[in-house]
Amino acid sequence: MGARIARIWRHWRSTAAKGRRAFPPETLDAIGKAITVGEQTHRSELRLIVEHGMPFDALWAGMGMRERAIALFAEYGIWDTEDNCGVLIYVNLAERKVEIVTDRNVGRKIDNIVWNRLCAAMTQGFARGQFHGATLAALEQVNTLLGQHFPAQGARANELPDGPIML
């Protein structure tokens, strides 16, 4: 019970203001542009969600980071793309962790080890206060991977908004 209370306290202390300092408007704009440019090179749809802290009910229920990322993947319809190639990068500032959730076609082509390395690189950058640079570097790597496995085949509709989501 003590660990649960400590985790809830950590999330409660991680405020929206801290999230805005880590991801100011110019960083959010750069992220959206990087997603837009990257999606011109592949058939995948990419979303980035930053959450300063999980909701109390999720924490009280003992929801883990991976479970939360999967719930957001579903809530925002990232699974619902024509080629089943959706990718979510979920950043939780209270936990200081990153999760990447992929739709089934992406999961078949790109191993989880690759995604785990990207998450670790982002987390290390965040630990140094490099939210802008670490996020853009990860997006570049994700777009390169997706371009290799799911290259663009002419013009296509943008199925999901490109701008990052701040919760």
Image (spheres, rainbow, N blue to C red):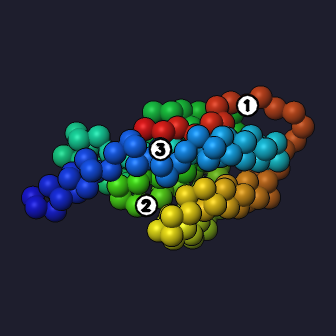
Measured in 3D between alpha carbons, the distance from the residue under mark 1 to the one under mark 3, in whole angstroms, is 27 Å
Image side of residue 41 versus residue 34, left or right: right
Residue topped by disc 2: 97
Residue 3, x across and y down, in percent: 16, 62
In the structure shown, which secondary structural element does the residue marked by tag 3 occupy? helix
Disc 2 from disc 3: Cα separation: 17 Å
Q: Secondary structure at mark 2?
A: strand
The residue under label 1 is 158
Tell me which residue sits at (60%, 62%) in the image: 134
Quarter of image, res 93:
bottom left
> What amino acid type should be assigned to the residue bearing mark 2?
Lys
Query: Which residue corresponds to mark 3?
Result: 20
Image vertical order of residue 152 relative to residue 156, above or below? below
Q: Position of residue 23 (x, y in %)?
A: 53, 48
Q: Is residue 47 visible to us here?
A: no
Q: Residues within 10 Å of mark 3 (few under 14, many from 20)?
A: some
One can see residue 133 in this view = yes
